[in-house]
Amino acid sequence: MLTCKSPRKVMLVAHHLARAALSSYSSKFSRHDYEQPQLVACLCVKELLRRSYRQAEALLLDCRHWCRAIGMRKVPDHNTLCRAAASLLRSCRVDRMLDAVARWAALHRALGLSLKPLAGDSSMFEHHHVSAHFAARRRRESRQARIRRRAGKKRDPGPALKRLPKLGLAVAAATHLVLSVWCGTGTGGDGPHFAKLLTQARRRVPHRRLKAVFDAGYDSEENHRLAREELGVTSIIPAAIGRPTSAAPSSRWRRHMRRLLATKGGRRRCGYTQRWQAETVVSMLKRNLGSALRGRSAWSRHRDLRLKVITHNVMIIGAFDED
């Protein structure tokens, strides 16, 4: 799927999307210098161009006509953008913007869920901008120096994986639009956030038959029951979790998955071969918007991940409008 990479177009589309989801001001007692949709548009441009808050302020000062195009009388400084990110990128407000994305897609018939399924995946992001090669080399050099100083001591365990930010997505495989998002920290299993991803996606496309394909990390009989018996979604998840064995799983839906996905033809007929579209979306996020986050705390990194998702959707919508 093509994406729009014009900063001015991204700003206009983000402003239009945020106006459909958010009120103009968070309080009637605010100074009313900037509207919330205007600040969302500035944050999307900042994320598109991979700028810091200070760099985004300098960019907007040089491109005042972008701000005038969305009705801004003056350019926000970096402190205003930072405070806006803390307020506007909360989970509840991002959910409202994803609701607006789903409404736009339904109006323009841009989801394509009748052609291809809903696909889910999760991925880890870098919690800093240091390259993996540089970090590994520094660890190796410091470990060797320690060994020379203190022979026989315990080796350096390296960076803690529990600090890495994690993003879970449910995307429309036909158009790569993200319909639901989950943010966390650490290398835990994927199963616990399956319910949130699927429930939110189902709420945004309520009047349609839906098929959801997820990888084996989401394998659970409870997840199948939630999808098929409570939400009316045809879930396709390989029954691969657990000790390897030739015996069929004892539970109903996992046993059905073992039969359904046993052959290549079966995987193609049921639509599971489209699950890689979710991995494509993760790759698009990391290539277009970067795989490293600027936030120092877990909550600020979650906001960074949500901003990447919103910017990704805006870029796809902008490409649709160009067509």
Image (spheres, helix red, strand yellow):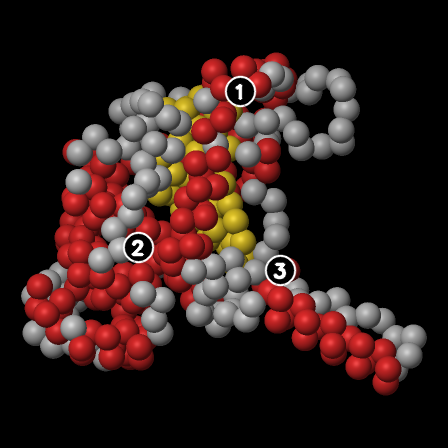
| Residue placed under numbered mark 2 in the picture | 311
Q: Residue 191, can we see it?
A: yes
Q: Are marks 3 and 1 in contact (CB under 8 Å)?
A: no
Query: Looking at the image, which is closer to me, 314 or 301?
Result: 314
First along the sequence among labels 1 and 2: 1
Query: What amino acid type should be assigned to the residue bearing mark 2?
Result: Thr
Q: Which residue is depicted at the point 40% across and 62% down?
A: 304
Answer few, some or many: residues within 10 Å of disc 1's Cα (few below 14, many 20 plus, some between 14 and 19): some
First along the sequence among labels 2 and 3: 3
First along the sequence among labels 3 and 1: 3
Residue 156 appears in which quarter of the rendering? bottom right
Q: Is residue 86 left or right of residue 253?
A: left
Q: Residue 96, can we see it?
A: no
| Residue placed under numbered mark 3 in the picture | 162
Q: Secondary structure at mark 3?
A: helix
Q: Is residue 170 left or right of residue 218?
A: left
How far is the residue under mark 1 from the one under mark 2? 32 Å
Q: Which mark is residue 267?
A: 1
Q: Secondary structure at mark 2?
A: helix
Answer few, some or many: residues within 10 Å of disc 3's Cα (few below 14, many 20 plus, some between 14 and 19): few
Most distant residue in the bottom direction: 149
Residue 20 x %, y %: 16, 49
Q: Are marks 2 and 3 in contact (CB under 8 Å)?
A: no
Name the quarter where the N terminus is drawn: top left
Foreground disc of the pair 3, 1: 1
How far is the residue under mark 3 from the one under mark 1? 34 Å
Query: Looking at the image, which is closer to me, 203 or 187?
Result: 187
Query: What amino acid type should be assigned to the residue bearing mark 1?
Result: Arg
Query: Looking at the image, which is closer to me, 159 or 263?
Result: 263
Q: Which residue is depicted at the point 69% across and 20% down?
A: 249
